[in-house]
Image (spheres, rainbow, N blue to C red):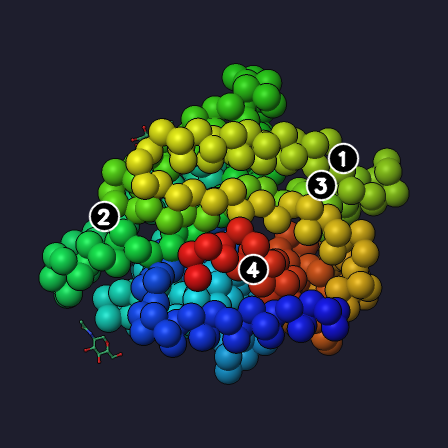
Amino acid sequence: MGKLHNTSLVWLLLSLLSQFCSGKQKVPAIIVFGDSSVDSGNNNFIPTVARSNFEPYGRDFFGGFPTGRFSNGRIPPDFISEAFGLRPTVPAYLDPSYNISHFAYGVCFASAGTGYDNATSSVADVIPLWKEVEYYKEYQQKLITHLGKAKANEIIGEALYLVSIGTNDFLENYFAFPQRQCEFTIQEYEDFLIGLAERFLRGLYALGARKVSLTGVPPMGCLPLERTMNLLEDHGCVEKYNDVALEFNGKLGDLVRKLNRELDGFQVVDANAYDLVVQIITQPSSFGFEDAREGCCGTGRFEMGFLCDPNSPFTCNDANKYVFWDAIHPSEKTSQIVSNYLVQTHLAKFL
Ligand SMILES: *[C@@H]1O[C@H](CO)[C@@H](O)[C@H](O)[C@H]1NC(C)=O
Ligand SMILES: *[C@@H]1O[C@H](CO)[C@@H](O)[C@H](O)[C@H]1NC(C)=O
């Protein structure tokens, strides 16, 4: 840990220095698409049960305030925005307490429970990915009205786009319901999703995006909820799901290389944190954690969303000791470790 701290300090100083010398931030805004891994609260403003705008969510956020983030505190876009010298939080586009003056520096279109597949967003009635893009188009118009065409286009072209999505397509959809399993083998379904990811990324490019960070899926079989259901293997990680995650992430990496070759000026980064998350889960104590099997909230075995009860006597006292905050989502501390790693490695070239 000591070594990690020193490197981050040097990196922080260097990045401050480079911003000071160039007099201008290279990335003027953070723009976010995806699911609950990056949703800062859009679902609070649509009729869905996939929500987290109540206690104990947000208890370690600024002011101890539940925001709709599926975390005890901040999530990766917040940390990444801060690391790029922007605001410490990225607001949700549908939140009426923010307007285009705030969104010019960072905006989140993500929706918990969504996926690449339209059928995934239908499960919990959340915002499909195509609709996130429609909101983004509306945002571009507001930005032009607010700042004029030249400045708006500069922000659109220089912004860093964070995309994190895919887990729900497998866990909420393919492995949970028969429909897609009847239509596709798992490999075919992965390829179907890759096709949708390609269509989405080409769409972003056509709309002016150039710098994109694409994050695939985590070791899904090690999420506490999946371990809880893994009765036959003494609640170990579900290897089948981890294998799918590895295979899917590999295909995403191929897609990234292809798009970078084919689309002039497109800089997509394969922001894969799978190995780091496996390392955190298998050696939690070397990252300062005490528990990597259960979430902090409730018993930690199945609770998330509305099941995360503010009055549960089982909820842990210190979420920093837990890799997971609820049965699916990382704790704020895990998000911070993963974000620091992504900024220092995959995203460093944009700093
Ligand atoms: C946005 O809201 C702030 C107050 O939070 C206000 O000062 C500002 O004028 C608003 N901007 C626009 C473009 O409405
Ligand atoms: C998802 O739904 C949108 C809106 O209805 C549609 O435009 C798009 O083609 C659909 N995607 C697929 C793969 O069916």
C-alpha distance separating marks 1 and 4 = 29 Å
Q: Residue at x 16, y 54 (%)?
A: 141
Amino acid type, residue under disc 1 in the picture: Glu
Mark 2: is the Cβ under 8 angstroms from ligand 2? Answer: no
Q: Hey, what amino acid is under mark 2?
A: Lys
Helix, strand or loop at disc 1? helix
Residue under label 3: 221
Whichever of labels 1 and 4 marks the residue nearer the N terminus, that label is 1
> In what quadrant of the picture does the C terminus appear?
bottom left
Disc 4 C-beta below 8 A from ligand 1? no
Q: Position of residue 48 (x, y in %)?
A: 43, 52
Which amino acid type corresponds to the residue marked 4 in the rendered image? Answer: Gln
Residue 268 vs 93, above or below: the answer is above
Circle 2 SS class:
helix
Q: Amino acid at mark 3?
A: Gly
Nearest the viewer among 300 and 84 is 84
Q: Measured from the top left, where is residue 2 in percent x and y? A: 74, 73
- Nearest-to-viewer mark from 1 and 4: 4
Disc number lying in front (4 or 3): 4
**Of marks 3 and 1, which one's residue comes earlier in the chain?**
3
Q: What whole-number distance in Å separates the C-alpha atoms at marks 4 and 3? A: 27 Å
Q: Quadrant of residue 18?
A: bottom left
Nearer to us in this view, 296 or 222:
222
Q: How many marks?
A: 4
Q: Residues within 10 Å of mark 4 (few under 14, many from 20)?
A: some
Return the mark for residue 137: 2
For label 4, the residue is: 344
